[in-house]
Structure formats: structure tokens, C-alpha cells
Image (cartoon, rainbow, N blue to C red):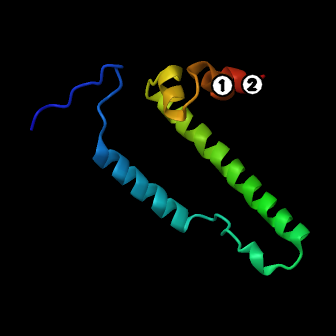
Amino acid sequence: MAPKQSRQDGAPPFDRAYYERLGEHIDEEMESGDYPEPVDVSDDPNPGARLKRLVYQKQVFEQENKRQTRIIVDELRRRGESWNAIGKLMNISGEAVRKQYSPEMRAQ
């Protein structure tokens, strides 16, 4: 088997098996976690109540997404990843990631 070579952008080589294991881990975590189940709102005849339930579900999802993103960004930084590399993963600039997730910016 040929050794893996770094990509031109300096990022480590893509490891499909790693991402498959990560996906399985996330799936297990979601299955065992205490996440609220999406609710079928179509059974409620009150459109206002249906909308409120959808808004609540969105807020819960967004809070958990922010929490998990912060944990992952912190881990990537501890592993030495640059803000720019993390930004590429998130489809935003490295500066935007740094402003949102750096410990110095969180303290302000």
C-alpha cells in the first residue's frame, strides 16, 4: 500500500475510514442521547400551535448545534488546526471562525 501523501493545501490526507467511524459514533450518540424527537405537527388543528412547536424544535436544534460546534472547534484548535483550515471545513473564513470561537473573543 502506498503511503498517504499530504494534499497541496497542507491538510492531512482524507481518511475515509476515520469519517465512517465518526459518522457511526455520531449516530450512536444521537440514538442514545437525550435529544427531543421531532414532532409531527400536522396532527394539531391549530396553525399557531403548530408554528410554535416548529419554532421550539428549531431553537433546540440550533442550541445543540452551537454547543457541538464549539466543542469540535476547540478540539481542532488543541490539535493544532489553523483558524483558516477550520473555516474551510465550515465554509466560512478563518477570521469569522476566530471571531466566533476563540477563547479571547468569548471572554468579551
On the rendered structure, is 70 left or right of 20?
A: right
Residue drawn at x 74%, y 24% is: 107
Number of residues whose C-alpha sits closer than 10 Å to that of mark 1, classed few (under 14), some (14–19) or many (20 or more): few
- Which residue is the site of mark 1? 103
Residue furthest out toward the left: 1
Say the numbered circle drawn on residue 14.
Answer: none
Image: 32 above or below 108: below
Q: Which residue is mark 2?
A: 107
At horizontal 29% and vertical 40% (from top left) the residue drawn is 15
Q: How many badges with numbers are in the image?
A: 2
81 or 40, nearer to the observer: 40
Q: Position of residue 68 (x, y in %)?
A: 60, 45
Q: Residues within 10 Å of mark 2 (few under 14, many from 20)?
A: few
Contact between labelled residues 2 and 1, with CB atoms less than 8 Å apart: yes
**On the picture, is 28 further left or further right than 17?**
right
Residue flagged by tag 1: what amino acid is it?
Answer: Pro
SS at mark 1?
helix
Residue 77 visible to the viewer:
no
Is the N terminus in the top left, top right, bottom left or bottom right quadrant?
A: top left
Question: Residue at left 67%, top 22%?
Answer: 99
At 36% across and 25% down in the image, what residue appears?
A: 11
Question: Whole-Å distance between the Cαs marked 1 and 2?
Answer: 6 Å
Residue 50 % position (x, y): 83, 69
The answer to whether 60 appears left or right of 48 in the picture is left
Helix, strand or loop under label 2: helix
User: Residue 16 in the image: x percent, y percent?
Assistant: 30, 45
| The quarter of the displayed image where residue 2 is located | top left
| Amino acid type at mark 2 | Ala
Camera sees residue 43: yes
Position of the C terminus, as image quadrant, is top right
Query: Considering only vertical position in the picture, is 77 above or below 50?
Result: above
Give coordinates of residue 84: x percent, y percent. Answer: 51, 21
